Amino acid sequence: MPLILTTCSSAPGSGAYVDYLTPAIILMAAAGTAEATAVNVCSDMAEGIISRFRTMSISRMSVLTGQVVGSVLQAFASVVVCIAVAFALGFRSSAGPVEWLAAAGMFLLLAFALTWLGVAFGLFAKTPAGANSMSLILLVLPFVSSAFVPTATMPAGVRWFAENQPFTAVINTLRGLLTGSPIGNSGMLAVAWCLVIAAGGYVWARSRYNLNPPRA
């Protein structure tokens, strides 16, 4: 507890470290849900559930779309719990209703993008363990971003990567909306990254779904 409440003097726009950390935990909730989605999709393919859906007179992509919608709703429920716990630990936000709505929209877009990528991982992997391993990148990348420490404190090479990877833009946007720290162009970059990831995940998932034979 003392560590969480330690003042992070180098974190712009934040007081206690929990204020700086909460946006990162929000992002991790989306990444964790995407990882679970990858494992679930791979398991469904292996157990033949999706093969049965293929024989029904429904849109082929509706099967994957339903998985994505369900996972995004699950991610949103998870982040509500995370925020409630953060408030209990001392998190204080300067955001008004507009900023909270913008943060919710940013989170939903992120969860949507990462979930489509998770679906693609699940369809590509041969086993649930393989899907889990592929999805670990979604949980590792936040550790090389502005999630837990300011990028200014990192070595030059690591700093360059951290400042130019997708999660940093998303975290800086969420942090700015919730704590009042400057956002700069992070908002536009975050939306752009999410749209690129969502489009890439969707195209990859669709191609794998149409290519993969039933694994019954």
Image (cartoon, rainbow, N blue to C red):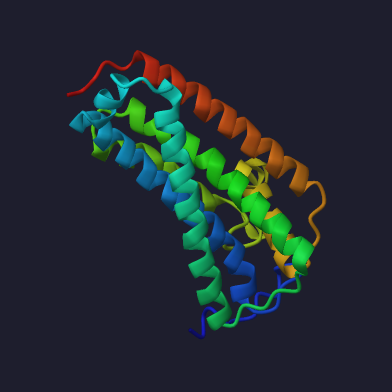
Q: Quadrant of residue 91?
A: bottom right
Is residue 89 something one can see in this rendering? no
Kindly identify the residue that appears in the image at 51 percent across and 85 percent down. 2
Residue 15: image quadrant is: bottom right
Up the image or down, 199 lies above or below 99; here it is above
Nearest to the observer: residue 46 or residue 177: 46
Viewer-closest of 134 and 12? 134
Residue 179 seen in the current view: yes
Q: Is residue 151 above or below residue 208?
A: below
Q: Is residue 16 left or right of residue 116?
A: right
Q: Position of residue 59 (x, y in %)?
A: 43, 22
Q: Where residue 182 appears, x then y in whole percent?
A: 81, 60
Q: Residue furthest front?
A: 57
**Image coordinates for residue 128, horizontal then vertical, percent:** 25, 38
> Going by the image, does 204 lie left or right of 36?
right
The residue positioned 71% from the left and 66% from the top of the image is 178
Q: Is residue 23 above or below residue 129?
A: below
**Left or right of residue 197, residue 189 in this image:** right
> Residue 199: x, y in percent?
58, 28
For the residue pair 146 and 37, the one nearer the viewer reads as: 37
Q: Quadrant of the C terminus?
A: top left
Considering depth in this image, is 5 or 28 the residue closer to the camera?
A: 28
Tally of numbered tags:
0
Tell me the residue at 55%/42% (across/down): 112
Reply above or below: 44 against 100.
above
**33 left or right, relative to 100:** left
